């Protein structure tokens, strides 16, 4: 029986059904490149994500492409072991330092696919931008918004833990879309001119944006439950 008929009426994308039927991971191949061996893959470009310690940082994913049930591969970064991937766990996250980097995936002793990524920058890292905001006292001003510089400490109701925070203000009363570490957080406007920004451990990047431009701010958080309540 054809798979289309077998799964008729089911809302799963057909490409994912094919991947499940073949036992291969459902990869977004537009975001990945396949190695010369045809057995491995890695991200086509560097991505930014929230490292649990460092905060916003560059990373790529690498691993086995269409692996057999007995397949495994060693993943290395700049010659140093990162992890071993298998059919059960075919993907690895590789966090990249501020340098030219080579990620390798070796499905056997004779085969190694290499992937190059250059994250060299004068910034903290490629995911933490330099800003041209103006600081006056304890406030940092951008074009359409401003934020407190010195973080406070409060209980975050979302996780029940003590966490550093800053306040972000809309200085124009225009509607501004607020994101924290690339995740949409809230909107500010004339009726809601302030947003509370809880900081994850490590580097945080938050923005306030509309059609006129994007304001960007950078703050560093600490491990949860380590700040002191006022």
Image: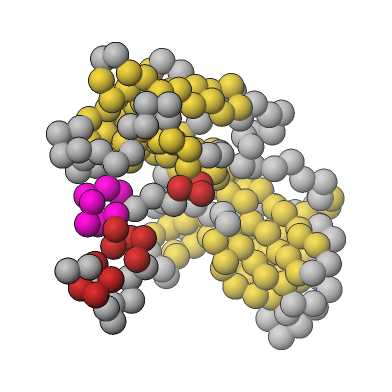
Is residue 23 rendered magenta in the image?
Answer: yes
Where's residue 17, x and y in %? 28, 62
User: Is 160 on the left or on the right of 207, as rendered?
Assistant: left
Q: Nearer the viewer, residue 154 or 83?
A: 83
Q: Is residue 60 visible?
A: no
Q: Nearer the viewer, residue 131 or 3?
A: 3
Single out the residue that lies furthest toward the front.
1
> In this picture, is 145 found above or below 190?
above
Single out the residue that lies furthest toward the bottom.
191
Task: Point out the stretch of residues depicted in magenta.
Answer: 19-25
Is residue 192 rendered magenta in the image?
Answer: no
What residue is drawn where x is 16% and y is 39%? 69
Where's residue 35, x and y in %? 42, 30
User: Is 160 on the left or on the right of 69, as rendered?
Assistant: right
What residue is drawn where x is 42% and y is 44%? 52
What residue is drawn where x is 41% and y is 15%? 79
> In this picture, is 209 found above or below 78?
below
> In this picture, is 8 found above or below 217?
below
Quadrant in the rendering for residue 161: bottom left
Q: Nearer the viewer, residue 154 or 219?
A: 219
> In this picture, is 20 found above or below 223?
below
């Amino acid at each position: 029986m054809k798979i289309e008929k077998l799964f008729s009426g089911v809302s799963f994308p057909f490409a994912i059904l094919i991947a499940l039927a073949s036992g291969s991971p459902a990869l977004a191949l537009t975001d990945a490149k396949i190695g010369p061996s045809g057995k491995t893959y890695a991200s086509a470009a560097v991505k930014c994500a929230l490292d649990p310690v460092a905060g916003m940082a560059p990373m790529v994913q690498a691993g086995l492409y269409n692996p057999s049930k007995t397949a495994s591969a060693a993943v290395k970064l700049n010659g140093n072991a990162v992890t071993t991937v298998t059919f059960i766990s075919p993907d690895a996250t590789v966090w990249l330092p501020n340098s030219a980097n080579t990620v390798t995936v070796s499905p056997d002793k004779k085969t190694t696919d290499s992937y190059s990524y250059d994250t060299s920058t004068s910034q903290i890292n490629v995911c933490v931008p330099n800003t041209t905001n103006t600081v006056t006292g304890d406030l940092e001003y951008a074009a359409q918004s401003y934020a407190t510089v010195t973080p406070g400490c409060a209980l975050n109701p979302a996780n029940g833990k003590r966490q550093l925070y800053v306040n972000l203000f809309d200085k124009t009363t225009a509607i501004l879309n607020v994101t924290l570490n690339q995740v949409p957080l809230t909107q500010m406007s004339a009726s809601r001119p302030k947003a509370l920004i809880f900081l994850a451990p490590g580097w945080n990047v938050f923005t306030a944006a509309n059609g006129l431009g994007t304001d960007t701010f950078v703050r560093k958080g600490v491990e949860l439950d380590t700040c002191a309540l006022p």
